[in-house]
Image (cartoon, grey):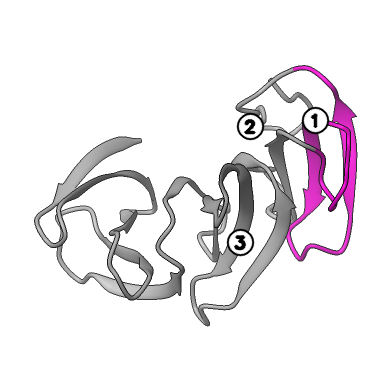
Amino acid sequence: MMWRSLLRVAVASLASFVGGMLVDSVAAQDGEPICVMNVDGTGMREVARVPPRGVGSPDWSPDGKYIAFDAVGPSGWQDQRVFVVEVATGKITDLGRGGVPSFAPDGEHVALHNFYGNRPGGTMPGIWFASRDGSSAKFLIEDGSHPRFSHDGKLLA
C-alpha cells in the first residue's frame, strides 16, 4: 500500500493496488468518491460515492471485482463501518461496524476488526469473519486487530 496525495480538495489517502490498478478516495463536500485508476495515474474513474466521512483501509478481492474499505460513521470513529463495493456496478454492501477489512483468498469472505460488536448493540469486539454479501458474520476471537489472511487462507494473523 502507499500514500498518495491528490490536489483536488487536498487530502492524503490510502491507496491499494491489484492487477495494475489503484484504488483511492478524495474527500469532497458532496461525498467521498471511491476511484480506481491505472498505476501511472491515468484512466481514473469513480466506482461509488459515500458520504464524506473518512474512507480508508481499502483491500481488493483476489479476483479484482470487489473492494472492501472502512468509513467513519456520522458520530465519529466509534461508528466506523466496513463496506464492500462491486467495481463493475458500484453496488455497496454494508458489512456492519468495524474496520481494516481483509479479503480471504476465496474472495467470498472478509475478516475485519470490530471495535464494538458486529450488530447494533453488539458487545463482542475483536476479529470477525463476514460473508462478502453481508448475509452472515461469525465472531472469531476477542483480541487482535488488522487481520490478514495467509495466501492459502488457512491462517489468519
- Distance in Å between CA atoms under marks 2 and 1: 25 Å
Choose between 41 and 13: the one closer to the eye.
13
Please tell me whether mark 1 sits on a helix, a strand or a loop: loop
Count the labels in the image: 3
Would you name the residue on which mark 1 appears?
A: 125
Q: Position of residue 127 (x, y in %)?
A: 77, 30
Looking at numbered disc 1 in the image, what kind of residue is underneath it? Answer: Pro
In this view, 134 is above or below 62: below
Q: Residue at x 78, y 17 (%)?
A: 143
* Quadrant, the N terminus: top left
Q: Are marks 3 and 2 in contact (CB under 8 Å)?
A: no
Would you name the residue on which mark 2 appears?
A: 151
Would you name the residue on which mark 3 appears?
A: 84
**Residue that protrudes farthest toward the bottom in the picture:** 89
Q: Residue at x 71, y 48 (%)?
A: 97
Looking at numbered disc 2 in the image, what kind of residue is underneath it? Answer: His
Q: Position of residue 87 (x, y in %)?
A: 49, 71
- Distance in Å between CA atoms under marks 3 and 2: 20 Å
What crowding class fits label 3: few (fewer than 14 Cα within 10 Å), some (14-19), or many (20 or more)?
A: many
Q: Position of residue 95 (x, y in %)?
A: 72, 57
Which sits earlier in the primary sequence, circle 3 or circle 2?
3
Q: Are marks 2 and 1 in contact (CB under 8 Å)?
A: no
Which sits earlier in the primary sequence, circle 2 or circle 1?
1
Q: Which residues are magenta?
A: 117-143
Choose between 121 and 153: the one closer to the eye.
121
Judge from the rendering whether residue 10 lies leftward or rightward of residue 137; answer left or right.
Answer: left
* Quadrant, the C terminus: top right
Please tell me whether mark 3 sits on a helix, a strand or a loop: strand
In this view, 85 is above or below 20: below
